[in-house]
Image (spheres, coloured by chain):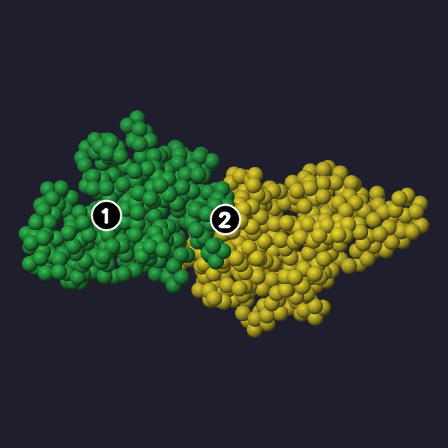
Chain colours: A yellow, B green
Amino acid sequence: MTDEEEMVVTPWEVRGKVDYDRLIKEFGTQKISEELKQRIFKIAGEEHFLLSRDLVYSHRDLDWILDKYERGEKFVLYTGRGPSGPVHLGHLIPWRFTKWLQERFDTRLYFQMTNDEKFLFTPDLSIEEVHKYTYENTVDLLALGFEPENTYVIDDIKHIDLMYEIGIRVAKKVTFSTARAVYGFDNSMNIGGIWYTALQAVPAFLHSEIYGVKTPCLIPCAIDQDPYWRVARDVAEKLGYYKPASIQNKFVPGLAEGGKMSASDPNSAIFTIDTPKEARRKVMNAFTGGRTSAKEQRDLGGNPDICSVFLYYKFVFMPDDKDLAKIERKCRGGEILCGECKQILAGMVEEFLEKHQAAREEAKDRVDEFSAARLRDDLRR
Amino acid sequence: MTDEEEMVVTPWEVRGKVDYDRLIKEFGTQKISEELKQRIFKIAGEEHFLLSRDLVYSHRDLDWILDKYERGEKFVLYTGRGPSGPVHLGHLIPWRFTKWLQERFDTRLYFQMTNDEKFLFTPDLSIEEVHKYTYENTVDLLALGFEPENTYVIDDIKHIDLMYEIGIRVAKKVTFSTARAVYGFDNSMNIGGIWYTALQAVPAFLHSEIYGVKTPCLIPCAIDQDPYWRVARDVAEKLGYYKPASIQNKFVPGLAEGGKMSASDPNSAIFTIDTPKEARRKVMNAFTGGRTSAKEQRDLGGNPDICSVFLYYKFVFMPDDKDLAKIERKCRGGEILCGECKQILAGMVEEFLEKHQAAREEAKDRVDEFSAARLRDDLRR
């Protein structure tokens, strides 16, 4: 045994130090090559810092999706959220990346709120709570500035009528043996959770089904969700659909040492509903790469590689490489100490939260405009 | 090993010679006592031949339902059909009994068309086929003369929105271990079939949920469905509902020797869509309790105990005990031979089919009037 906890990465649990290259090997995905990155940037007409900084780092069939796209066959985007609690800044990162893809490729997005999953997989979570969080989390999504024309938010429980038939067609092709092997279930798993794994495949096929045109689907998601797409890909062609492609991100680091930003440790994450004052306090308590004394830090410099504040700059607040390089240089050179650096981040977080919270208020009345219930009319046509 | 095939009775398979008393013991239900029968007849204001002749023979909590009823607390009825093929006369027997209960107790009936179950449990059955049979079987149900005011036909796939939330609440309480033990699943079972077992509990709770009033539910059904209600009863109180009660019938005998009337052996059953001529042919080929020669039969008499023609009189066409006793006496006394007896039954079957098929035609345009989709309006109120 090493002194490090063994890595466990499933759609419901991430534990231990995550080895991202090993995950690519274990899951059988592919690393996004420099060439593929440049290809995306070229088609998109601009770079995106999450790709160039390798937070988005792995894929399945992204090259195939781009081939199709360049030949004029458009894809749809599909991502989602398990609404089991409030949203934190870490959640927003892949959503913003998804929005970039949506805008750059001018595609439709299906966003699945997996409230049934969260209800089924979380012992003490009630139906009322998952409904509440579905609404609250949708408000956070909309606050990022999505447009209803191209954005369809699927509420699993409320919109099950749109998905159930496809869901049972998927489920009929998946045995309990397979589910056990892929998701690590044992016999104490409830029969709803077992079923749910089929439902998560459905939005990848929904567009094809509703409009009667076989349509490629690209799924931006965190790497831990990959088991779902493996199963979706296994059944897709048997059901007459394309295999969904995916583009996968690493976990967003938290404010504590190591680990991802986690809703289960409130101090590791800044929630979108935190007061700016509360958020400032969390930032000021963040784990950094500072030295034991101010003098030592001025002499030897700080270590941004392990610093959660720096990671916030890198993955959220400093999309411009020049800004990031500047703060990194100052840190390593001992020009800036952690207290001052945290103050800078705290200011950015406060500003972001104020803006986001105002946008949340405006979004509250607009949830229905984004509802996948609109698809019912298209189905009937 | 005996020379008889071992008895296997699950919701999806009935094999071997069925020992009904043993089923009561194994399933843990109760025999309907003479006293309980008389109590039903008294409240109903009349007898029913299926109860007095013990085709309906077992129950759970029927006495409790009657206690509630007599104290003014009404129950709802729930039964259903797996629409995997055409309906035969055997299917109609419990439906007619259900209709009698509905009329005598003036209650609402929820009738579940389990098209998802049939799709999931039948390897070669397509979605299109289960939709077709859902419609066709509903037409058969309506042809029996149900009234829409008190009859709600649930199409699992089309009305899943009414049931999914209750379904996942049930499913969360049932582990794969339990499902495996109760239904005999192994790991090769598909994950949709595993889930479905939760959905079959839902109509028992639907009325309580929609109207916000905890309402007793009585389920008339064949004894092989009992495992479903055992699970439904286990979870009911945890979810705030009454345990569903049930009243269970034996399998309806077929035209061949032994076994139940089975859709998988077309000659064992008379389908409601058989032409009268075809039905006559099947009746004339039925297994009887006749002797090897006419002379022997006139001397020794026939044996109605093993005769499928007699069972048709008993469970379908001769509700009047005097009529039944008369034909039995003639048979045992050698007064009537099998050919003549079959001609009588064939005439009855032809007459029934002509009437039923005319009623089917009239019912075809009325399917929507009975749809459980009407419950959506009640939910919104």
Residue B93's disc number: 1
The circle drawn on residue A318 is none
The three-letter amino acid code for the residue at tag 2 is Phe
Residue B212 % position (x, y): 40, 34
Which residue is drawn at the image coordinates 57% and 57% (left, top)? A181
Residue A100: x and y, percent? 64, 58
SS category of the residue bearing label 2? helix
Labels 2 and 1 touching (C-beta < 8 A) = no
Whether residue B198 is visible, yes or no, is yes
- Provide the residue designation for mark 2: B176
Left or right, A20 with reference to A154: right
Say which residue appears at 79% left-offset and 45% top-offset: A287
Q: Badge 2, how many Cα within 10 Å: few under 14, some, many 20+?
A: many
Labels in figure, total: 2
Expressed as whole percent of the image width and height from the top left, the position of residue A269 reads: 70, 44
The residue at 13%/42% (across/down) is B320
Q: Quadrant of the N terminus of chain B?
A: bottom left
